[in-house]
């Protein structure tokens, strides 16, 4: 979950690599995975699909105990809103969901009305206001 990601855990990110256009996605799930390398496309073992991943700079150090690097991976499950718009997450979102428009290297991103599935009120639309969590 993004709320469980500390800023220092992503402080060595240099780039986010997107495997597909995320502009049409209301949210992506993010997690910190233990991976054997700083860079490159990681192996993916979850259901669904990997949407993107973070690359780390040369100063990132591996874990002393496992020799692995903690890197963010962005992903979606088969029952997420992009695949099943009227499904489980039609008007809500999973806990680890983040609006991909708010993500950047070293920034864990935020939840927004868009990511949470709630439409803005007509007054907010008129004023151009969008809530961020």
Image (spheres, rainbow, N blue to C red):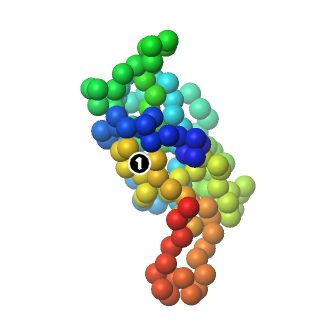
Q: Would residue 126 be seen by someone viewing this image from the given angle?
A: yes
Residue placed under numbered mark 1 in the picture: 107
What percent of the width, then of the height, locates residue 71? 44, 32
Q: Is residue 34 above or below residue 10?
A: above
Find the residue positioned furthest to the right: 88
Q: Residue at x 36, y 22 (%)?
A: 61
Q: Residues within 10 Å of mark 1 (few under 14, many from 20)?
A: some
**Count of labels shown?**
1
What percent of the width, then of the height, locates residue 56? 33, 32
Q: Is residue 76 above or below residue 102?
A: above
In terms of depth relative to the viewer, which is nearer, 80 or 98? 98
Q: Residue at x 38, y 30 (%)?
A: 41
Q: Quadrant location of the C terminus? A: bottom right
What percent of the width, then of the height, locates residue 81? 62, 56
In terms of depth relative to the viewer, which is nearer, 59 or 38? 59
Q: Residue at x 27, y 26 (%)?
A: 58
Q: Residue at x 43, y 37 (%)?
A: 8
């Amino acid at each position: 979950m993004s709320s469980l990601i500390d800023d220092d855990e992503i402080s060595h990110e240099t780039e986010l690599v997107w495997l597909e256009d995320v502009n049409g996605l209301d949210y992506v799930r993010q997690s910190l995975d233990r991976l054997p390398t700083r860079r490159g496309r990681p192996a993916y073992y979850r259901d669904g699909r990997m949407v993107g991943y973070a690359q780390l700079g040369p100063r990132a150090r591996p874990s002393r105990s496992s020799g692995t690097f903690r890197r963010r991976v962005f992903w979606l499950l088969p029952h997420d809103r992009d695949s099943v718009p009227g499904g489980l997450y039609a008007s809500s979102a999973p806990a680890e969901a983040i609006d991909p428009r708010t993500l950047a290297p070293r920034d864990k991103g935020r939840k927004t009305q868009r990511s949470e599935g709630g439409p803005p009120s007509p007054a907010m639309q008129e004023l151009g206001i969008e809530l961020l969590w």
